[in-house]
Image (cartoon, rainbow, N blue to C red):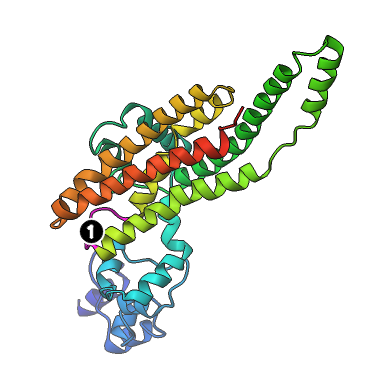
Amino acid sequence: QQQQQQQQQSFQPNDPFQPQQTSPMNMNSSAFPPQSGPMNNMTMGGPPPLQQQQQQPSGLMSPQQPYQQQQMQQPPQQPRGCWGNTMMCLSLDSYRMYFDIDADDIVARIRAVFFHFYKPDYFRNNVLGAVKTNELKGPDLYGPFWITMTLIFIIGVTANFHAYVHHTAVAHKSSGSGSNSTSMDAATAEEEAFDYDINHLLHAASICCGFAFVLPTILWMTTYCCMSMNALTLAEWICLYGYSLVPFLPVAVICIIPFGIVSWVFLAVATAVSCLLVVRNIAHPLLATDAGQAKAPPIILFILGTHVVFFLFLKFSFYHHSG
């Protein structure tokens, strides 16, 4: 009976659902050689997967840290000195944000100059924006630059047209007293004798660039450095003065008409709109500073005076002829 039981046990198939007992020798032989994997690396004494990822060289395909975590890891910036501010002004990267603007924003700001020039702080707060957002992109330098260049070209062309029309009218008037044949010949000769003055373009460039860029820089240095009035940034000063030249664009075309009263009236209206745009947007920030009540009124009067001087320069340099 014992032999029969042993024979039955030897021929009994193994149950796949029951664990098989293996000897230590069989265990070691089946586990050798070790298979590659994270668990085998941990058991065989290798570095864990996290350490392996940290030891891998960073490249284009390596996982990057979140932006906020990178900002937290960056050391705090040291305060810049005078030399650091000077080098920052000479760097082109510091001006990139002031040219991040599209044509729709420029058109909206030009339209606001004509419709909201008289509202206090409206153009600076509701059109430009003190802080750059998705809707308001803050002060820019792209619009003031191209507005100034366009005005220079228009003044250079219209000043010559104005001189030509005036010259032609004077020629016909002076030749009207003689006979018809001789008067026509004299008028034609005087018309052909007219020469366009290229110096109008150079004079317009110096006057407009000085008004749009040099003057606001002087005002910013006076208020910020000399009077300790931290009211407006340099970009805001230049932006306001640049967009204040917008009313002169259509007026310069109208001044082709060779009548003195036309140029006087329209240039005065454009100067008033430009001056109101600047004064209504800088008066409140200047007066809100600690020393604003005593130092802001002279600055505002100086702005009014410079607009009057700019008006007289345009009138007598480009659109004024005797006779």
Q: Which amino acid does label 1 sit on?
A: Asn
* Residue in the foreground of this view, choosing between 100 and 91: 91
- Quadrant housing the C terminus: top right
Residue at 75% over, 13% down: 177
Rendered view: 112 above or below 55: above
Residue annotated with mark 1: 230
SS label for mark 1: loop
Tell me where the magenta segment starts and ends, as one range.
Answer: 227-233
Neighbour tally class for label 1: few under 14, some 14-19, many 20 plus, Cα within 10 Å: some
Residue at 41% over, 30% down: 268
Is most of the magenta stretch helix, strand or loop? loop
Rendered view: 310 above or below 38: above
Rendered view: 262 above or below 55: above
Rendered view: 78 above or below 121: below
- Quadrant housing the N terminus: bottom left
Q: Is residue 309 left or right of residue 169?
A: left
How far across and how far down the image is residue 267, in percent? 45, 30
Q: Is residue 301 visible?
A: yes
How far across and how far down the image is residue 107, in percent? 44, 32
How far across and how far down the image is residue 47, in percent? 32, 83
